[in-house]
Image: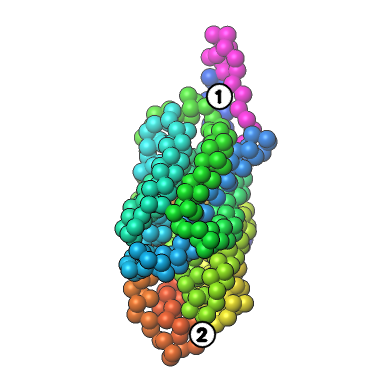
């Protein structure tokens, strides 16, 4: 019975998407009739959910996602470098703030960026160009840093502002390009982070050991320009702005529903611990007596399975209720933290943890499309971009809090030499915190079962 209900809800969600598409087509037909009367050419839109235009657009989004997010998601490699080299090692306790601020502000800035995109629809494509310029400027200026606070401002805050402007238009445009396969489309795009996370840690680890952080930051700025610049041509709206930008007030009615707050609460709680393994696995590997390459391998493995997690959970969102997919992600992530990371004292088990955690936790953001569909059932006028922006902001809270909170937990060093394996390594507090955070991410599943949604 529950399965039938989930299928029905999924079909309802696709029905809403189809209704959106029919509404657009109706406006196009009306515009075409007006143009026929004036002798103008009819408008022909590219097909959604497939075709060469849709796949080129998705490929462009995938690559921009990979280049924008892959760098901060591989920050653990830089953290290990900064904490062991002059100038920055003197303030090692603040180094984690660089990575958490980069990811956190990108997430937290999403609602503001989406609001600007809504207010200035004719300039949406320019946002990505400006964002790319700011990112490149941030990387170049950070290459001259001599203090940790220099890196926080440039590699952290400034990079985040540019990154938010670069990637948020892809979210708005993808909502037009993929209607019935929306979950799949977002899953493939977000998998770009995982793919780049497989390669970037090894490249950065090699470069930091052979050259310096300054050289690698400048080199990466060149890579961004060369690879991202041409791809911006394909990242464009499917529906002409003149047809899709009718002025209307943003609807915030969904904020009054318990559904939003339950789903958002689970999202924030899950994000509090999500970023911990990706930041601390390299340094944790070092405490086990492993090489820097071993630490890089763990981050790379996490990002590898995140690719599959994004696509798999994104596809499941098109078939199952969002809370069911959240439960799948929650169970896998929680068990992997407590049973694998907590008991790991060697590289093989640590690698297994990275694989399993990446598969289940790494795909959590793919549930956002399901959240959007669920809220649009409550409020048909709710903008997908606004909902996504608020969810991203919730995740940003977790990312920003992760840096200082993790440093406190690490400084306490509970259960050292009193517990086994990872729990007694000095990282026990971080491991338990991460596991509890992953478990609380399933709050929405419980909320639905007791009738709060």
Q: Residue at x 36, y 64 (%)?
A: 88
Q: CA distance from mark 1 to mark 2?
A: 63 Å
Q: Which label number is shown at residue 307?
A: none
Indicate left or right for 142 with 6 as reference.
Answer: left
- Per the image, the residue denoted by label 1 is 28
> Where residue 440 sits in the image (x, y, percent)?
44, 69
> Where residue 311 sits in the image (x, y, percent)?
62, 54
**Mark found first going from the N terminus, 1 or 2:** 1
Indicate left or right for 328 with 271 as reference.
Answer: right
User: Is residue 304 something one can see in this rendering?
Assistant: yes
In this view, the residue in front, 377 or 35, is 35
Q: Residue at x 57, y 18 (%)?
A: 32
Question: Is residue 36 covered in magenta?
Answer: yes
> Where residue 60 sits in the image (x, y, percent)?
58, 41
Residue at far right of view: 51
- Badge 1 crowding class, 10 Å Cα cut-off, few under 14, some 14 to 19, many 20 or more, is many
Q: Quadrant of the C terminus?
A: bottom left
Q: Relative to residue 152, is residue 23 depicted above or below? A: above
Of helix, strand and loop, which one carries label 1? helix
Q: Residue at x 58, y 46 (%)?
A: 62
- Per the image, the residue denoted by label 2 is 421
Q: Relative to residue 246, is residue 254 depicted above or below? A: below
Q: Relative to residue 361, is residue 105 depicted above or below? A: above
Q: Residue at x 68, y 35 (%)?
A: 52
- Badge 2 crowding class, 10 Å Cα cut-off, few under 14, some 14 to 19, many 20 or more, is some
Question: Is residue 386 covered in magenta?
Answer: no
Q: How many marks?
A: 2
Of helix, strand and loop, which one carries label 2? helix
Magenta extent: 32-48
């Amino acid at each position: 019975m529950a399965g039938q209900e989930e299928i029905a809800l999924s079909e309802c969600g696709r029905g809403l998407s189809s209704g959106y598409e029919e509404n657009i087509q109706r406006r196009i037909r009306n515009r075409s009739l007006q143009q026929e009367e004036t002798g103008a050419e009819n408008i022909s839109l590219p097909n959604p959910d497939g075709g060469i235009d849709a796949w080129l657009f998705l490929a462009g989004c995938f690559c921009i996602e990979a280049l924008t997010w892959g760098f901060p998601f591989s920050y653990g490699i830089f953290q290990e470098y900064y904490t062991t080299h002059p100038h920055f090692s003197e303030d090692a306790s603040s180094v984690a703030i660089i990575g958490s601020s980069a990811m956190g502000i990108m997430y937290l800035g999403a609602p503001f960026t989406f609001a600007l995109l809504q207010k200035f629809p004719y300039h949406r494509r320019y946002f990505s160009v400006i964002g790319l310029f700011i990112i490149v400027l941030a990387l170049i200026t950070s290459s001259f840093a001599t203090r940790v606070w220099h890196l926080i401002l440039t590699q952290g805050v400034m990079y985040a502002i540019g990154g938010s402007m670069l990637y948020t238009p892809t979210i708005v445009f993808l909502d037009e390009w993929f209607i019935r396969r929306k979950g799949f489309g977002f899953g493939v795009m977000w998998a770009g982070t995982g793919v780049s996370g497989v390669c970037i840690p090894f490249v950065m680890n090699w470069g930091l050991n052979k050259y310096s952080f300054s050289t690698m930051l400048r080199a990466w700025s060149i890579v961004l320009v060369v690879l991202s610049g041409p791809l911006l041509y394909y990242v464009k709206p499917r529906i002409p702005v003149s047809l899709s930008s009718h002025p209307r007030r943003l609807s915030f009615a969904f904020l009054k529903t318990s559904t939003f707050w339950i789903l958002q609460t689970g999202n924030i709680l899950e994000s509090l611990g999500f970023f911990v393994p990706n930041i601390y696995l390299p340094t944790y590997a070092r405490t086990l007596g492993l090489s820097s390459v071993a630490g890089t391998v763990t981050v790379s493995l996490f990002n590898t399975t995140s690719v599959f997690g994004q696509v798999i959970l994104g596809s499941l969102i098109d078939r199952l209720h969002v809370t069911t997919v959240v439960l799948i992600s929650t169970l896998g992530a929680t068990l992997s933290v407590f049973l694998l990371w907590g008991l790991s004292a060697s590289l093989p088990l640590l690698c297994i943890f990275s694989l399993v955690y990446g598969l289940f936790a790494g795909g959590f953001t793919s549930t956002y499309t399901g959240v959007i569909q669920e809220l649009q059932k409550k409020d048909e006028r709710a903008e997908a971009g606004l909902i996504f922006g608020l969810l991203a902001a919730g995740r940003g809270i977790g990312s920003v809090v992760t840096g200082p909170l993790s440093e406190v937990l690490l400084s306490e060093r509970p259960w050292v030499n009193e517990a086994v394996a990872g729990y007694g390594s000095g990282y026990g507090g971080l491991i338990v915190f991460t596991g509890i955070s992953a478990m609380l991410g399933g709050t929405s599943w419980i909320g639905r079962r007791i009738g709060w949604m």
